[in-house]
């Protein structure tokens, strides 16, 4: 496979070009085919070491990175903060340097503070280590691999055989929920508007500040709107992405009650009647069932893409590890 690729690390999507997105989608599509075979493994990253350094909890991202690395024949190292030497006062940079000394080629980093993956990348570059850093979610800043798997999932609905960003041009995507605390929303704004989709951000005024309208990437081919009216966001939407209320990041009282939130902004079968008939629902997970989305809608295979997002995650993360690691 020969594909153009200029990114040494993947820390955010703000500098991704339309060509970069198509390279990821096409590479992920090839790996999706590999994953459908009886023998689901390729030797692309044989003898490389992928270290998963998750300083914040994760189910989907961590496990799919580990599986993706193994499907590419890389060796994987996993790290758990609570049983690590962080508890004895070791710093994050010293932890990263320890994995460098063990021969890590790629480090996948998640941290609750924005900027930690960039700080580790800067240190690895300063040491001329050649190590590549993949951001697996940092604070409220970015979650690039989630946005790329969302893009892949949507592209596969629109054109299953040949997923590309061209299919998203002019599509309406409503992102509903806790935008303020969401790194997933921030990364999706970059990818979806670069792909040409029109993105509507919707939630309570406390969770969706108007200043988000200025939050545009380098290649804004689609438009970005902020609305506090769910009807406006859902009307004729092609895709609805609901987001979790991130209680762990909320320091103030931003909502009257969860019951009231669900009444006004929870996505239900009744409310999505405003959308296009072909509408599909996404959620990056983890989900607060019955809060941002009703349980029956989440489990409806005709409408919900939530399991597809998780499945796409492995192929997309294989693509990203391959593109930076080959
Ligand atoms: N979507 C996502 O990042 O999920 P995890 O926190 O389980 O990795």
Image (spheres, rainbow, N blue to C red):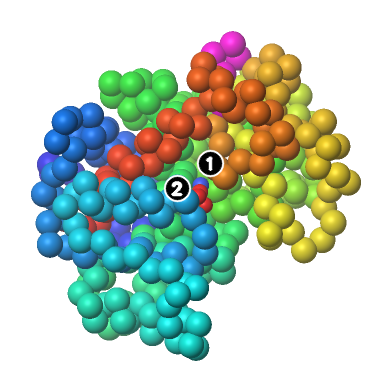
Magenta-colored span: 276-281
Instruction: Please tell me whether residue 139 is drawn above or below residue 98 in the rendered image.
Output: above
Q: Assess mark 2: CB under 8 A from ligand 1?
A: yes
Q: Quadrant of the N terminus?
A: top left
The reply to whether dot 1 and dot 2 touch (C-beta < 8 Å) is: yes
- Tell me where residue 135 appears, x and y as whole percent: 42, 60
Query: Which quadrant of the rendered structure holds the C terminus?
Result: bottom left
Extreme residue toward the front, this view: 83
**Mark carried by residue 60:** 2
Q: For ligand 1, tell me if the residue under mark 1 lies within 8 Å.
A: yes
Instruction: Using a 10 Å C-alpha cutoff, classify the residue at mark 2 as few (fewer than 14 neighbours), some (14 to 19) or many (20 or more).
Output: some
Residue at image point 31% right, 81% down: 98
> Extreme bottom residue here?
89
Q: Residue at x 73, y 20 (%)?
A: 271
Camera-nearest label, 1 or 2: 2
Residue under pointer 1: 284
Helix, strand or loop at disc 2? Answer: helix
């Amino acid at each position: 496979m020969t594909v153009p690729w200029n990114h040494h690390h993947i820390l955010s999507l703000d500098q991704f070009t339309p060509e970069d997105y198509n390279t990821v989608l096409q590479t992920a599509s090839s790996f999706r085919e590999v994953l459908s075979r009886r023998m689901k493994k390729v030797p692309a990253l044989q003898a490389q070491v992928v270290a998963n350094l998750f300083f914040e909890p994760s189910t989907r991202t961590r496990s799919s990175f580990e599986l993706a690395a193994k499907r590419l024949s890389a060796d994987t190292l996993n790290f758990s903060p609570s049983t690590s030497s962080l508890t004895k006062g070791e710093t994050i940079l010293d932890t990263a340097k320890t994995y460098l000394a063990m021969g890590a080629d790629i480090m996948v980093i998640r941290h609750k503070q924005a900027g930690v993956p960039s700080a580790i990348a800067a240190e690895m570059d300063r040491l001329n280590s050649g190590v590549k850093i993949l951001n697996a979610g940092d604070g409220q800043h970015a979650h690039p691999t989630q946005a790329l798997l969302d893009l892949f999932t949507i592209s596969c609905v629109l054109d299953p055989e040949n997923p590309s960003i061209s299919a998203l041009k002019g599509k309406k995507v409503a992102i509903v929920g806790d935008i303020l605390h969401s790194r997933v929303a921030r990364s999706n704004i970059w990818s979806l508007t670069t792909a040409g989709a029109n993105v509507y951000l919707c939630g309570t005024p406390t969770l969706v500040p108007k200043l988000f309208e200025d939050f545009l990437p380098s290649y804004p081919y689609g438009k970005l709107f902020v609305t506090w009216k769910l009807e406006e966001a859902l009307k004729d939407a092609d895709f609805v992405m609901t987001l979790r209320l991130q209680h762990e990041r909320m320091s103030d009282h931003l909502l009257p009650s969860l019951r009231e939130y669900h009444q006004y902004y929870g996505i239900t079968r009744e409310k999505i009647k405003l959308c296009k008939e072909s509408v599909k629902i996404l959620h990056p997970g983890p989900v607060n069932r019955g809060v941002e989305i009703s349980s029956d809608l989440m489990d409806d295979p005709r409408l919900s893409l939530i399991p597809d997002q998780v499945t796409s995650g492995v192929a997309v993360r294989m693509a990203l590890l391959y593109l930076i690691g080959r």
